[in-house]
Amino acid sequence: MPLLYVTDLAYPARGRRYGDEDVFLTSRLRGHFPLALCHPLDAEALMPGFDAVIVRNSGPVIHHREAHDSFRAAALAAGTRVYNPLTGRGDMAGKQYLLDLTAAGFPVIPTVDDPADLHLLPRADTYAVKPRQGADSIGLAFTAAPATPPGEFLIQPRVDFAHEVSFYFVDDAFQYALYAPDPERRWDLVPYEPTAEDLAFARRFIDWNTLAHGIQRVDACRTRTGELLLVELEDLNPYLSLDLLPTAVQNRFIEALADSLRAFLAV
């Protein structure tokens, strides 16, 4: 089954090498599937010639929102298989999930989208404010007194955290974890051995997202008191930092991904 692999090999991601990761990953996936690469702006026109589309390191959607929305609508209308499936409830659907999870009492950085609701957040000297449709820290600002238009920006208390940690899953199976020991250097990652409590935390969000197939990254921060709080549930095109993994872990991940794709294509 020929696959169309969507990536922007030239996207200048800060602290990440999109092109290198996708060259490596496609070189390994070719041992399992025939595939071709294309830029996200070409995906809609090319997808009719393929059995499925894999969306990978295609850059933040905000840089090509119109093209992405058109691709998504066309894929849904034609019944085209897209991996990750277009039913994701995390970043794939925008940032509403941060508000929903806050309201539902999940362990997430508390979030509102209206300055009038600041009283619902823990008291803070500084708040993080970011566009509701933002990504990759684009438009992020810090202020003591948020005064943004209701519904257009997310507002969170600025958390004093010890480190950030990411948990990587294929389908609902945990693969590996990486963390950034220095809070100021988000993408200087090293392998992390999660505890049972850490994995239970991450699995809550995997279960909530209800994706039967796909790659998901659960990003969290650990507070100074040891609590994990969700920062982001990345289910659209999560960067995988494969170059930081031991060969055995890389191989296990690729086999898990190939198995997931076969199961997805068989549905």
Image (cartoon, rainbow, N blue to C red):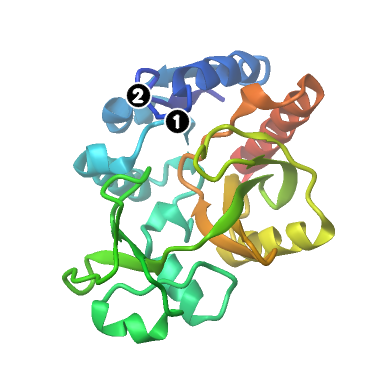
Can residue 220 be seen here? The reply is no
User: Image point 54% across, 45% down: which residue?
Assistant: 183
The residue lying toward the viewer, choosing from 261 and 95, is: 95
**Relative to residue 25, is residue 232 depicted above or below?**
below
Which residue has dot 2 on it? 11
Q: Is residue 64 above or below residue 124?
A: above
Kindly identify the residue that appears in the image at 72 percent across and 32 percent down.
253
1 or 2: tag closer to the N-terminus: 2
* Circle 1 Cα neighbour tier, 10 Å, few/some/many (<14 / 14–19 / ≥20): many
Question: Where is residue 147 drawn, in percent x and y?
Answer: 18, 71
Task: Pick out the residue farthest to the front.
Answer: 125
- Can the viewer see residue 139? yes
**Residue in the image at 51% along x and 49% along y:** 235
**Left or right: 205, with 194 as reference point:** left
The answer to whether mark 1 and mark 2 are in CB contact below 8 A is yes
Q: Considering only vertical position in the picture, is 229 above or below 192? A: below
Residue 57, numbered label = 1
Using the numbered discs, state the Cα–Cα distance from disc 1 to disc 2 in whole angstroms: 9 Å
Q: Quadrant of the N terminus?
A: top right
Q: Nearer the viewer, residue 140 or 263?
A: 140
Mark 2, Cα crowd under 10 Å, few <14 / some 14-19 / many 20+, is some
x and y, in percent, of residue 46 in the image: 33, 25
Q: Secondary structure at mark 1?
A: loop
Residue 29: x and y, percent?
63, 20
Q: Nearer the viewer, residue 214 or 99?
A: 99
Residue type marked 1: Asn
Amino acid carrying mark 2 in the image: Tyr
